[in-house]
């Protein structure tokens, strides 16, 4: 193939790409990730704001934060060297499809819709925006243990978060105050000697 022909084919390819870009530009919001990827950072809660809302560790437990990014924070609940559960909070502004599984939720926890995701995961949707998830690890957790952990998050504090962290997040019309259900007795008692959360890099 001559050099001239190669140059000609290259120019045709570039021209085709440019024409395609202009043709599809009006439909960019229909493409996968076309709207989510363009969410301004100012409209997404940073993962650092979630850390203080995780459950307080009980005696013998530690909370080890393993991942933190825009709209997401994750930690391991450890008992000694054993990881009992993965705990996470995510801002569904960056992934609106995550809210769809809560539409037909048959259960509630402290007034928020609760769903099960397989035999080892439970998830809660707070203020129609923040997903809180507990995933059993190792020997696993039964459903009640997962629900106890979800209830130990500071859910009212999470509901009041907003990206600017200066004013409460407005609840959708018709969404009243969540029903106040006391946390389980075992997690309500905080011993003076209980461990504090530590920040470690993910393994």
Image (tube, helix red, strand yellow):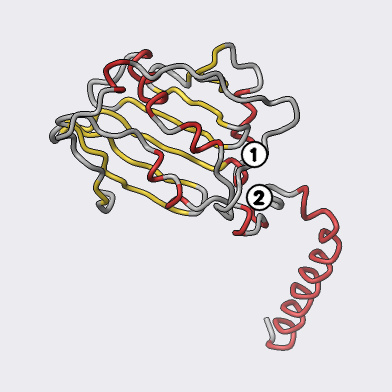
Q: Nearer the viewer, residue 24 or 15?
A: 24
Q: Residue at x 63, y 32 (%)?
A: 128
Q: Is residue 28 above or below residue 135?
A: below
Tag 2 near tag 1, CB within 8 Å: yes
Where's the N terminus, which quadrant? bottom right
Instruction: Name the spot of residue 155 as percent of width and height, x first.
Output: 48, 31
Q: Residue at x 69, y 86 (%)?
A: 2
- The residue pinned by badge 2 equals 36
Instruction: Name the spot of residue 194 as percent of width and height, x first.
Output: 18, 34
Instruction: Report, in whole angstroms, how far the alpha carbon at label 2 lies from the one at label 1.
Output: 8 Å
- Toward which corner of the image does residue 53 lie, by quadrant? top left
Element carrying mark 1 = helix
Q: Residue at x 60, y 32 (%)?
A: 127
Q: Is residue 41 above or below residue 146?
A: below
Nearest to N terminus: mark 2 or mark 1: 2
Report the disc number at residue 96: 1
Instruction: Name the spot of residue 36 as percent of width and height, x first.
Output: 66, 50
């Amino acid at each position: 193939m001559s050099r001239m022909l190669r140059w000609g084919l290259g120019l045709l390819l570039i021209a085709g790409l440019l024409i395609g870009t202009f043709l599809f530009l009006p439909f960019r919001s229909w493409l996968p990730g076309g709207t989510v990827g363009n969410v301004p950072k100012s409209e997404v809660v940073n993962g650092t704001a979630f850390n203080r809302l995780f459950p307080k560790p009980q005696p013998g437990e530690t909370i080890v934060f393993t991942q933190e990014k825009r709209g997401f924070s994750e930690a391991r609940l450890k008992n000694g060297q054993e990881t009992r559960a993965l705990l996470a909070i995510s801002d569904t502004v960056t992934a609106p499809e995550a809210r769809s599984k809560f539409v037909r939720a048959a259960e509630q926890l402290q007034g928020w819709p609760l769903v099960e995701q397989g035999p080892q995961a439970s998830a809660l949707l707070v203020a129609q925006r923040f997903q809180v998830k507990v995933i059993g690890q190792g020997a696993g957790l039964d459903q009640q243990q997962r629900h106890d952990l979800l209830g130990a998050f500071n859910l009212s504090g999470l509901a009041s978060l907003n990206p600017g962290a200066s004013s409460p997040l407005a609840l959708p019309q018709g969404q009243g105050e969540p029903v106040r259900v006391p946390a389980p007795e075992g997690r309500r008692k905080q011993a003076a000697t209980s461990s504090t959360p530590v920040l470690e890099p993910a393994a």
